[in-house]
Amino acid sequence: MPYLILSDIHANLEALHAVLDDARGRYERILCLGDLVGYGADPNPVVEWARSNVDVIVRGNHDKDCSEAGPLDHYRSIAAVSAVWTRGQLTASNIEYLRALPRGPLRYEGIDLVHGSPADEDEYLLMESEAAAIRPYLETQATFFGHTHMQGGFLVAPRGVRELIPESFQLEPDYFYLLNPGSVGQPRDGDPRAAYILFDRDRGLVEFRRVEYDIETAARKIRQAGLPEGLALRLAVGG
Ligand code: ZN
């Protein structure tokens, strides 16, 4: 049975529920690449869901920054506003859980899990040249990463690196793969549907999935929480 691989849920409960409904009965473990919180209006329900359902998880930058009291000047203002709001919402035990999340890379059953990249949890892997530069850090055939909110990833071959189109395929020997499930709760690749991966490790099968969810409700909750309007608007455009 495959793993359900999720990243960047970002406190979007409607998107999370749609993904779980879509994947129901098709996986045996849930692996998460971080950023449970930040941006969205449901940080506590999403963290509580993770605490009781996620099997393996690495922390994301928002998990770290929303559960610590440190400065937020590395964020754009919209992210800083949402981090301050999220800090005020999280219960003490959810803050404790987020603080204790392990930093990637984390090895699980022969695959590596990271938030940003194997070299740096906060690095964005967006271009082929960036994927090529972290080749020395790849130790397992498949490394799953998030952080960019772009579904897809890279095939790292002996002679070069190629961006992957997010469609189902089978891993081939002799290649390394950097695989990004995309974002559950705030896609930025132009497709507003929630994104995830089903990965059958035994057969090496990767299935990129997208599913529609109730964007209107998620956006309304963001507005009702008094979070920046841009966070509500971007959900509908997936950007
Ligand atoms: Zn994120």
Image (cartoon, rainbow, N blue to C red):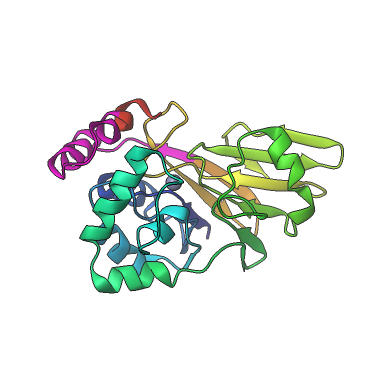
| Residue 126, percent from left and from top | 60, 35
19 left or right of 160 in image: left
Judge whether 27 appears above or below 9 on screen: below
Judge whether 76 appears above or below 138 on screen: above
Could you tell me which quadrant the C terminus lies in? top left
How many labels were placed on the picture?
0
Q: Identify the residue at horizontal 51%, vertical 50% (top origin).
A: 198
Question: Which residue in the rendered view is the most extreme toward the left?
Answer: 224
Which quadrant of the view contains residue 131? top right
Decide whether the magenta segment is chiefly helix, strand or loop.
helix
Q: Evaluate whether residue 171 shows in this view.
A: no
Q: Is residue 4 magenta?
A: no
Q: Identify the residue at horizontal 51%, vertical 69% (top origin).
A: 102
Q: Identify the residue at horizontal 22%, vertical 36% (top origin).
A: 219
Judge whether 56 appears above or below 186 on screen: below
| Residue 136, percent from left and from top | 79, 53
| Residue 152, percent from left and from top | 57, 37
Nearer to the camera, 3 or 89 = 89
Which quadrant of the view contains residue 45? bottom left
Question: Which residue in the rendered view is the most extreme toward the right?
Answer: 159
Range of magenta residues: 209-233
Q: Identify the residue at horizontal 35%, vertical 49% (top origin).
A: 10
Nearer to the camera, 77 or 97 = 77
| Residue 73, percent from left and from top | 42, 47
